[in-house]
Image: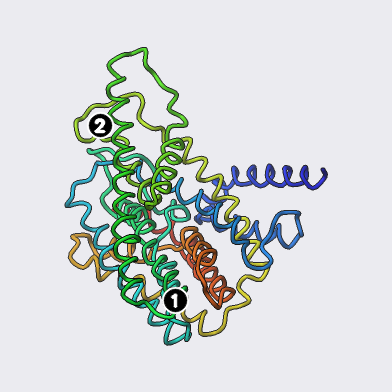
Amino acid sequence: MKPYYTLLLIVGITSLVASFLPIILKTFKMSFTVPLLVLGGLLFYLETPLPWPNPVWDIDTTLKFSELVVIISLMVAGLKIGLNYSWKEWRNPFRLIGVTMPLFMLVVFLLAYYLLEFSGPVALLLAAVLAPTDPALASDIQLNKKQEIGSKNVGVQYNLTAEAGLNDSLAFPFVFLAILWSQHDSLDYQQWKTWLGYYLVYKLTVGIIVGIAIGFAYSYITTKMAKYKWLKIQKTFVAISLTLISYGAAELLEGYGFLSVFLTGLFAHYHKHAKNQSTESEPSIGFITDVERFFIIFWMIFFGGSIVGGILNFNTIPTLLFGSILVLIARPLLGYLSLYKSGLNAKKKWAISFFGIRGIGSVFYLTYAIKYGNFSDINSLFSIVAFIILLSIVLHGFTTKRLIPKLTND
């Protein structure tokens, strides 16, 4: 029983230390992920009895834990945005999805195929895995509260939140395309037909319908209940409940659960935004945000431990160059290109383009593909993705607190 009690002690101390982080963060102006990364490395070095990677991540454990963190983060993003934004204000996030994301994937594929000399399926998998920006690790540069019509943010934070909510869902079809390719010598007519009809059209359609339906249904029912003062609900757990219902329903119907969760968050306030009918049953964002932060703490601890444990050891000079080009050159340039006629000033364009952090979503997609696909170079894939996430965390961790306040007031 001693290892069990030791584990409880470590979890308690770690979460308590994280509670004091805001004091440190105010002084040194860094993201909360940076000290957690260091703490994870220290705990690994001290050989604390935690289930550390050896040196790469356990597929099943990492898959489920990352999945849980991502869906919670997507619900938080959806609830913060709501339906406060017009179609015109959604143009910039759609530019990032429609221009930056496919061009970034093309750059990743070409570099992975020609520079790193990976096979077609592995190069495509890397492109799909690295396509989404992260709604969890990027929380410091995204919307920090529910938006209201009269005081909503339409700049850097809004665009990054909306982009992360959408592209963490829309990368999945390309992960499946890579899996299909890994299981066959080539992508022939039958594979393309299956991908277009099932993985692209059907699964996206189901995800959209389920997400909107559940969000609208909750908004409709609670609006009707508001007519009777004695019908009050405990709304603390509503956001978590909607997350699990939406994700579970979409996945059971073989749709994209990530997209469903994000849309449920958007539409959970439908009657407030569309018909100006407020109720006391609107999902509380406080509790689910705390749950999200709690999970991220331990995800970062294990990520820091994996760095010290040797997950980067399979990198080479070309793969390090590859990761650096993507984070420092490709994403900023392609992001700025897509926002060229966005109406935002140059500072905000560069900020949105620069803060395209990769993180937990990429780990989920990678472990999912490895579990269900037939890929080679698995250790190299883990090392490359871990390096890019580490570079994103460190680079953005030391710049976010300094730049975002200036851009918010600009």
- List the residue tagged with mark 1: 184
Horizontal and vertical percent position of residue 201:
28, 58
Residue type pointed to by label 2 = Lys
Between 91 and 329, the one nearer to me in the picture: 91
Looking at the rendered structure, the kind of residue marked 1 is: His
> How many neighbours does mark 1 have within 10 angstroms: few (below 14), some (14-19), or many (20 or more)?
few
Q: Quadrant of the C terminus?
A: bottom left
Element carrying mark 1: loop
Query: Going 44% across and 48% down the picture, which residue do you hit?
Result: 73
- Res. 212 visible in picture: yes
How many other residues sit within 10 Å of disc 2, few (<14), some (14-19) or many (≥20)?
Answer: some
Location of residue 151 by image quarter: top left
Please tell me whether mark 2 or mark 1 is closer to you in this view: 1
**Earlier residue among tags 2 and 1:** 1
Q: Is residue 256 left or right of residue 209?
A: right
Rendered view: 189 above or below 63: below
> Residues under labels 2 and 1: Cα distance?
49 Å
Find residue 133 and name its label: none
Residue at left offset 30%, top offset 19%: 226
Towards the viewer: 155 or 300:
300
Image: 356 above or below 108: above
| Residue under the point 40% across and 80% down | 186
Towards the viewer: 371 or 229 = 371
Q: Which secondary structure lies at badge 2? A: helix
Residue at the (82%, 45%) spot, across then down: 2
Which residue is the site of mark 2? 272
- In the displayed structure, does residue 90 sit left or right of residue 64? left
Q: Where in the figure is residue 387, as x and y percent of width and height?
A: 54, 71
Residue 206 horizontal/vertical position (percent)? 32, 49
In the picture, measured across the screen, residue 318 lies left or right of residue 223, that is: right
Q: Residue furthest right?
A: 2
The quadrant of the image that shows the N terminus is top right
